[in-house]
Amino acid sequence: MIHSPYQKYRQAQAETASKPKLLIMLYDGAIRFTKAGVEGITSRDYEMANNNLVKSQAIIHELVSSLNFDYPISNELVRIYEYMLLLLIEANVKKQVGPAEEVIAHLVELREAWVEASKSAVAGSM
C-alpha cells in the first residue's frame, strides 16, 4: 500500500515511463541499493547491508528477465548480470565492500551506455 505522496509519485513515474527510461530507473535503483549495502557493511549494520544487497539482486534479476535474446548483445549482458549477482552474493556473505563496489562500477557504466543509446534512438527518430 502506498502512503506517502513521494511513493505515489514514484509509482506514477514508473507506470508512465518509456522502456528506456524504465531501464535507466532500474539501474538507478540497483546502484542506490548497492551503495546502501556498502554503507551497511562499512558501518557493520549487517541487516541493512543484507536487505539492500538483496534488493539490488532482485533488480538485476529483473534486468535479466527483460532481455530479448533475439539480439546478440543479450547473451553478453546476461553474463555480465550473472557475474554481478555472484559479486553481490560474495559481498553479502563475506561482508566485503570490494565486490559490491565492483558491481557499482559495472552498473554505472551500463547505465551510461543505456542513457547514450536512448539519446541516439531519440535523435534517430527525429
Image (cartoon, rainbow, N blue to C red):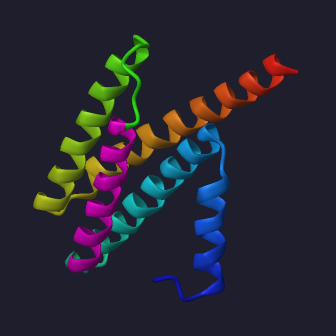
Identify whether 53 is placed above or below 110. Answer: below
**Residue at (59, 87) in percent of width and height:** 4
- Is 24 displayed left or right of 70 in the figure? right
**Residue at (66, 43) in percent of width and height:** 18
- Tell which of 76 and 126 is nearer to you: 126
- Tell which of 32 and 118 is nearer to you: 118
The residue lying furthest to the top in this view is: 72
Name the main secondary structure of what is drawn in magenta. helix
**Any part of residue 110 in sight:** yes
- Tell which of 73 and 87 is nearer to you: 73
Range drawn in magenta: 47-65
**Count of numbered marks:** 0
Residue 50, percent across and down? 22, 69
Residue 94, percent across and down? 11, 59
**Any part of residue 44 in sight:** no
Residue 84, percent across and down? 28, 40
